[in-house]
Image (cartoon, rainbow, N blue to C red):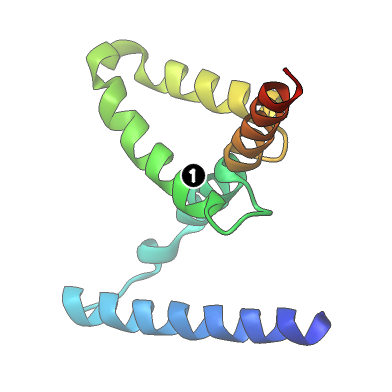
């Protein structure tokens, strides 16, 4: 199991290095603002929101955290308040993340359907 974790970490490091190289190539330059503290916080929030224990958790979290501010432009005055409230409510109600919580819900619904 430890070997698999090391291999997964090495593969993810290769992907990160390649994507960083492509980003600097596309932009023509790279600065420290590209990977600042708030960018790191945003990435961790995406993973935690979707669920860190599943493969699709980070993908779902990034989709939601990218799309939600666009949807909330309807209430532009309260956009940050609503976004923060939705994120806090999701993280409090679904401690393991959105994807595992939805998986548990579908499992419960299927087991209720079989018992009848």
Q: Quadrant of residue 82?
A: top left
User: Does residue 71 appear to the left or right of 15 in the view shown?
Assistant: left
Which residue sits at x=45%, y=77%? 16
Which secondary structure lies at badge 1?
helix
Q: Quadrant of residue 77?
A: top left
- Say which residue label 1 marks: 61
What percent of the width, then of the height, locates residue 109? Answer: 65, 25
The residue positioned farthest toward the right in the image shown: 2
Q: 96 above or below 88?
A: below
Which residue sits at x=41%, y=38%? 64
Which residue sits at x=45%, y=54%? 39
Q: 86 above or below 48?
A: above
The quadrant of the rendering that contains the C terminus is: top right
What percent of the width, then of the height, locates residue 32? Answer: 40, 68
Which residue sits at x=41%, y=22%? 80
What percent of the width, then of the height, locates residue 93? Answer: 69, 23
Between residue 7 and residue 33, name the one nearer to us: 7
The quadrant of the rendering that contains the N terminus is: bottom right
Residue 28 in view here: no
Residue 11 in view here: yes
User: Does residue 79 appear to the left or right of 116 in the view shown?
Assistant: left
Q: Residues within 10 Å of mark 1 (few under 14, many from 20)?
A: many
What percent of the width, then of the height, locates residue 15? Answer: 45, 80
Between residue 17 and residue 49, name the one nearer to us: 49
């Amino acid at each position: 199991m430890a070997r698999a974790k090391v291999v997964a970490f090495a593969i993810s490091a290769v992907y990160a290095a390649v994507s960083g190289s492509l980003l600097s190539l596309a932009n023509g330059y790279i600065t420290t603002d590209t990977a600042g503290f708030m960018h790191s916080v945003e990435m961790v929030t995406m993973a935690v929101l979707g669920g860190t224990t599943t493969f699709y958790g980070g993908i779902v979290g990034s989709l939601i955290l990218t799309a939600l501010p666009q949807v909330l432009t309807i209430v532009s005055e309260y956009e940050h308040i609503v976004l923060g409230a939705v994120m806090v409510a999701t993280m409090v109600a679904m401690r393991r993340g959105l994807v595992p919580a939805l998986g548990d819900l579908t499992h419960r619904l299927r087991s209720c359907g079989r018992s009848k």
